[in-house]
Image: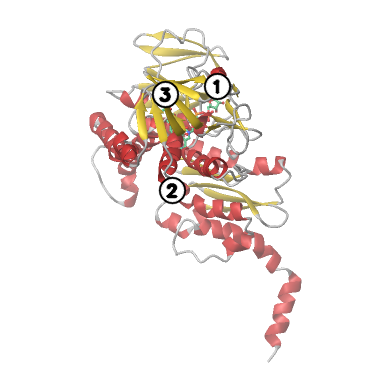
Amino acid sequence: MDRYDIAIIGAGAAGLSVAAIGAAFGLKVVLIERGAMGGDCLNYGCVPSKAMLAAGHAAAAARDAGRFGVRTGPVTVDWAAMRAHVRGAIAAIAPNDSIARFQGMGVEVIQAAAHFTAPDEIEAGTRRLRFRRCVIAAGSAAVVPDLPGLSGLPFLTNETLFELESPPEHLLILGGGPIGIEMAQAHARLGCAVTVIEAAESIMGREDPEAVAALRTALARDGVAFIEGVAATGAEPDGEGVALLLADGSRIAGSHLLLALGRAPRLAGLDLPAAGVEASKRGVAVGRDLRSRSNRRIWASGDIADPAGIGPRAFTHVASQHAGIIVQSMFFRLPARLSYAALPRVTYCDPELAQIGLTEAEARAEGRCAEVLRWPLGENDRAVAEGIEAGIVKLVVDARARLVGATVLAPRAGDWAGIFGLMIARGHKLSALAQLVLPYPSLPEAAKRAAGEYYGPRLLRPAIKRLVAWLMRLP
Ligand SMILES: Cc1cc2nc3c(=O)[nH]c(=O)nc-3n(C[C@H](O)[C@H](O)[C@H](O)COP(=O)(O)OP(=O)(O)OC[C@H]3O[C@@H](n4cnc5c(N)ncnc54)[C@H](O)[C@@H]3O)c2cc1C
Ligand SMILES: NC(=O)c1ccc[n+]([C@@H]2O[C@H](COP(=O)([O-])OP(=O)(O)OC[C@H]3O[C@@H](n4cnc5c(N)ncnc54)[C@H](O)[C@@H]3O)[C@@H](O)[C@H]2O)c1
């Protein structure tokens, strides 16, 4: 039986990060992947979705060019060329995640499905291996609901959506979270009819309602239709397409149905009981150091990890954050405590919705919202120059004027998320942002103006004005 310092199950964002670091430290690492190297992010998630959104944004910009005095002919979408662009983006990034690259680093890669046979043993294809340490990084898959009539229908998930050879005439999207909303805008801008059906009161229910309202308006302008606050109760065929039966008694038919109802950890087939690893339907139960409490040889990382008290998060940047925690807790045996206090998340629509740290509602629930500062993008010179109408910056501060959360709805809002993450993680006060010199004209100046809203009223109090007047009279 082959022996390894670290065995890693899954070569997605989470598994690849740990494998690369383990090999760099000179450890004997084996990486086991049953599907495509790079996992969801590269093949069925972040990369194809952002590539498709880019095509949609290009179409929208061309249609919108007239308001800048730029005339174009009618805008048409060449679906095959759009798909070639999506495939090209995946192909351009794939070498970073390839078997060849990881073998070059000294990682042994096994292409097979892995399952545990003992607390320190794995079987992968014809191979049996023993490990000192193991990282379960098997990711998550789209939730398929137990909806009467659905199982016999040709529904789409993120694993099949990007393979469509022609544009869906009318795409029904069940679920108005980030996957549903990003794909709604991409398809609408590429010329498809799109209806989003969301069971909760509002799409993007975790996000700031003020920002969501503006985003909803922007998507409606692209032609996306919304049915909110109504659950689907069944599905049935409708000619060549699919129809959903809704709880209010109505029925909506479309040519295609995309399921975007959240993610479920890929636990099936791992045989976790053989290794004595505890898990639930949320994922592999681990501490804030990402280590299993029931098998101290095993850690979990990425979408499949369910850290006690804070739960799973399905983001590629969380997978790399997890790798950092595993380096501390596994490699160096240092105390490590995962925190999502400064975590960014971005929905890559136009405009983008970025949330860093707590939303206003979350901060209020935690008793950490002393004040909320706002600045509308409509009052930012760069936004005016570029004809950007929708957008807002909201900053949430605690009683000591420290930033605890930021909401930004703006084009490329994700690109300026880092500044807020740094401030929250370091406990910086709002004065750090208010004093920052930013280039003019730039959209992030709106954040500085929001911070200025905190200090303005405090600085311009009558007593301070009197003091200034008195100082001015001094020789
Ligand atoms: C449509 C979509 C868009 C997204 N967009 C973004 C985005 O813009 N930004 C962002 O941060 N996140 C985004 N995400 C989330 C992001 O893709 C995931 O958080 C990330 O891919 C998780 O990485 P992972 O390594 O945990 O899991 P995965 O990428 O799922 O990798 C797990 C790997 O394990 C393999 N595996 C599973 N079981 C076994 C087994 N028994 N044996 C061997 N191999 C196994 C799987 O084949 C898979 O390759 C998006 C997700 C989707 C679906
Ligand atoms: N830009 C990004 O970073 C990005 C993009 C896409 C996905 N992701 C990650 O992937 C995860 C999964 O995304 P998602 O959008 O599938 O899930 P989600 O859990 O974020 O949203 C699912 C939505 O479906 C709704 N829903 C649930 N059951 C329903 C039903 N029966 N009928 C109608 N609506 C129903 C929920 O209320 C929710 O609004 C995200 O949470 C995120 O972590 C990230």
Q: Nearer the viewer, residue 125 or 40?
A: 125
Mark 2 vs 1, N-terminal side = 1
**Cα distance in 3D space between marks 3 and 1:** 17 Å
**Cα distance in 3D space between marks 2 and 3:** 51 Å
Camera sees residue 177: no
Image quadrant in which the C terminus is located: bottom right
Q: Locate residue 165, reporting x and y percent.
A: 27, 23
Rendered position, 433 above or below 267: below
Please name the amino acid that badge 3 sits on. Answer: Met
**Secondary element at tag 1:** helix
Task: Quickly name the residue at label 3.
Answer: 1
Please name the amino acid that badge 1 sits on. Answer: Ala
Q: Nearer the viewer, residue 187 or 346?
A: 346
- Kindly identify which numbered label has been placed on residue 24: none
Q: Locate residue 226, reporting x and y percent.
A: 49, 27
Mark 2 vs 3, N-terminal side = 3
Q: Residue furthest front?
A: 1
Rendered position, 213 above or below 263: below
Frontmost of labels 3 and 1 is 3
Residue at point 52%, 11% (across, down): 147
* Res 159 → quadrant: top left
Residue at point 60%, 42% (across, down): 338
Task: Quickly name the residue at label 2.
Answer: 412
Circles 2, 1 touching at the beta carbon (< 8 Å): no
**Cα distance in 3D space between marks 2 and 1:** 44 Å
Q: Nearer the viewer, residue 373 or 148?
A: 148
Frontmost of labels 2 and 1 is 1
Determine crowd level at label 1: few under 14, some 14-19, many 20+ residues with C-alpha closer than 10 A.
Answer: many
Please name the amino acid that badge 2 sits on. Answer: Arg
Task: Quickly name the residue at label 1.
Answer: 275
Q: Give left or right: position of 371 versus 286.
A: right
